[in-house]
Image (cartoon, rainbow, N blue to C red):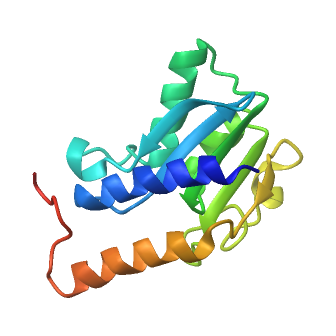
């Protein structure tokens, strides 16, 4: 695991925050090089599929000209939901590194154990990496939403 890559995922999450999106960022790495990047863009694109992980997978597939992302590691700031976990597994990503646990929707460890849903073809998973930084960004975002104090950049 490389802190530089989780740092890049956090940078993308901060951009999402500034744009009024739930602050999740993701990068995909192969052979020490970032081959895919993504951040939440659901509000921007008005598309339920525009999660950071899906955006990063799309970018990596395009850049590698292959849907099989074997030999890749995804770094993401929040534990993936069931849709994103399914995409990670279907893309054959070998390793998943995530920051904050999602106790309500997380499907890498918290809510659903991926062994139950996806059997033996799941990535190696490491959670809680840069957890404090990732969690703080998410908490600040939702605190601003609850206080009707829209995060910076909303609707910009």
Q: Residue at horizontal 49%, vertical 27%?
A: 59
x then y, percent, for residue 32: 71, 32
Left or right of 9? Residue 2 is right
Q: Residue at horizontal 79%, vertical 39%?
A: 94
Q: Is residue 65 above or below residue 149?
A: above
Residue found at the far right of this picture: 120
Left or right of 61? Residue 71 is right
Q: Closest to the observer: 136 or 112? A: 136
Q: Closest to the observer: 138 or 51? A: 138
Q: Residue at horizontal 62%, vertical 67%?
A: 130
Residue found at the far bottom of this picture: 147
Q: Closest to the observer: 7 or 68? A: 7
Q: Quadrant of residue 107?
A: bottom right
Q: Is residue 137 above or below residue 55?
A: below
x then y, percent, for residue 44: 22, 46
x then y, percent, for residue 113: 76, 65
x then y, percent, for residue 9: 51, 51
Q: Quadrant of residue 151?
A: bottom left
Q: Residue at horizontal 43%, vertical 53%?
A: 11
Residue found at the far top of this picture: 65
Q: How many marks?
A: 0
């Amino acid at each position: 695991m490389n802190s530089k890559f989780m740092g890049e995922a956090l940078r993308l999450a901060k951009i999402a925050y500034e744009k009024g999106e739930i602050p999740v960022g993701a990068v995909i790495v192969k052979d020490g090089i970032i081959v895919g990047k993504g951040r939440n863009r659901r509000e921007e694109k008005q598309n339920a599929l525009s999660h950071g992980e899906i955006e990063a997978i799309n970018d990596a597939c395009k850049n590698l000209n292959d849907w099989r992302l074997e030999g890749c590691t995804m770094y993401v700031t929040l534990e993936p939901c069931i849709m994103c976990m399914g995409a990670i597994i279907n893309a054959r990503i070998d390793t998943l590194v995530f920051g904050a646990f999602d106790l309500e929707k997380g499907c890498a460890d918290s809510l659903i154990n991926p062994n139950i849903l996806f059997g033996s073809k799941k990535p190696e998973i490491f959670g809680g990496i840069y957890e404090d930084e990732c969690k703080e960004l998410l908490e600040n975002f939702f605190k601003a939403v609850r206080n009707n104090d829209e995060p910076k950049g909303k609707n910009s």
